[in-house]
């Protein structure tokens, strides 16, 4: 299952693991939490970021605008990925863009949890070289940059929605005694 940057952009999340959990045979117990592929533990998932293996997903929470493509392999793992009990999440980060592009996202929750997010992404060429293509001469980027980041200021990024009951002190004493 392959997700492109355009598909990831419309998923209502800021975590890398949430788009992974949209694949078949993938379980995620809480939003923003680790994933289990094929019934294996979270440590059985191999994350690969631009060809570099990251075992168990530690440090994989990348800025959402920095991902070009995300591939989830849940079964029939090719030998070049190694031997894993769960699955493989192959992440390709954005590279340099032929034109200067970018975006900024500012988000503030109104639900009382005081969740705040500033997310940005910018990419573009630094040096272009003239290249002949057929009869035309075009400038192709040779060297470029890509920079993305997220800044969070939260009280509770992933609040739970379980019921919480509070009693008055005298009711608690009565319950404990009886």
Image (cartoon, rainbow, N blue to C red):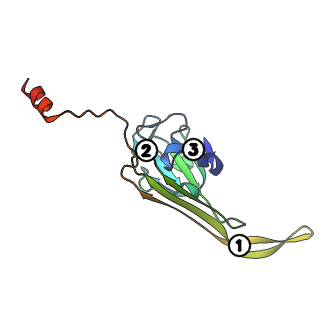
Q: CA distance from mark 1 to mark 2?
A: 47 Å
**Of label 3 and label 1, which has the lower sequence position?**
3
What residue sits 73% from the left and 71% below the top?
A: 141
Disc 3 designates what residue? 11
Tag of residue 142: 1
The answer to which of marks 1 and 2 sits earlier in the sequence is 2
Q: Quadrant of the C terminus?
A: top left
Mark 3 to mark 1: distance in Å?
A: 32 Å
The picture places residue 11, in percent across and down from the top left corner, at: 57, 44
User: Which residue is at a point 55% across and 42% down the rendered structure image?
Assistant: 73
Residue situated in front as seen by the camera: 114 or 31: 114
Residue at 77%, 70% in the rendered image: 140
- For label 2, the residue is 111
Q: Secondary structure at mark 1?
A: strand
* Front residue (pair 65, 1): 65
| 178 relative to 114 in the view: left or right | left
Q: Residue furthest right?
A: 135
Asked if 86 appears above or below 134 in the picture, the reply is: above
Badge 3 marks a residue whose secondary structure is loop
Q: Is residue 132 left or right of residue 121?
A: right
């Amino acid at each position: 299952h392959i997700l492109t940057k355009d598909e990831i952009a419309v998923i209502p999340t800021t975590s890398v693991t949430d788009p992974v959990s949209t694949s078949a045979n993938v379980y995620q117990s809480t939003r923003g939490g680790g994933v289990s592929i094929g019934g294996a533990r979270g440590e059985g998932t191999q994350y690969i970021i631009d060809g570099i293996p990251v075992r168990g997903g530690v440090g994989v929470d990348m800025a959402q605008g920095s991902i070009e493509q995300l591939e989830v392999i849940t079964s029939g793992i090719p030998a070049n990925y190694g031997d894993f009990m769960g699955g493989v999440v192959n992440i390709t980060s954005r590279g340099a863009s032929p034109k200067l592009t970018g975006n900024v996202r500012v988000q503030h929750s109104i639900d009382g949890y005081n969740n705040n997010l500033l997310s940005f992404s910018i990419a573009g060429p630094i040096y272009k070289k003239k290249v002949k293509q057929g009869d035309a001469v075009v400038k192709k980027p040779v060297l470029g940059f890509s920079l993305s980041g997220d800044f969070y200021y939260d009280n509770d990024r992933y609040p739970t929605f379980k019921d919480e009951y509070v009693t008055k002190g005298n009711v608690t004493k009565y319950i404990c005694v009886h």
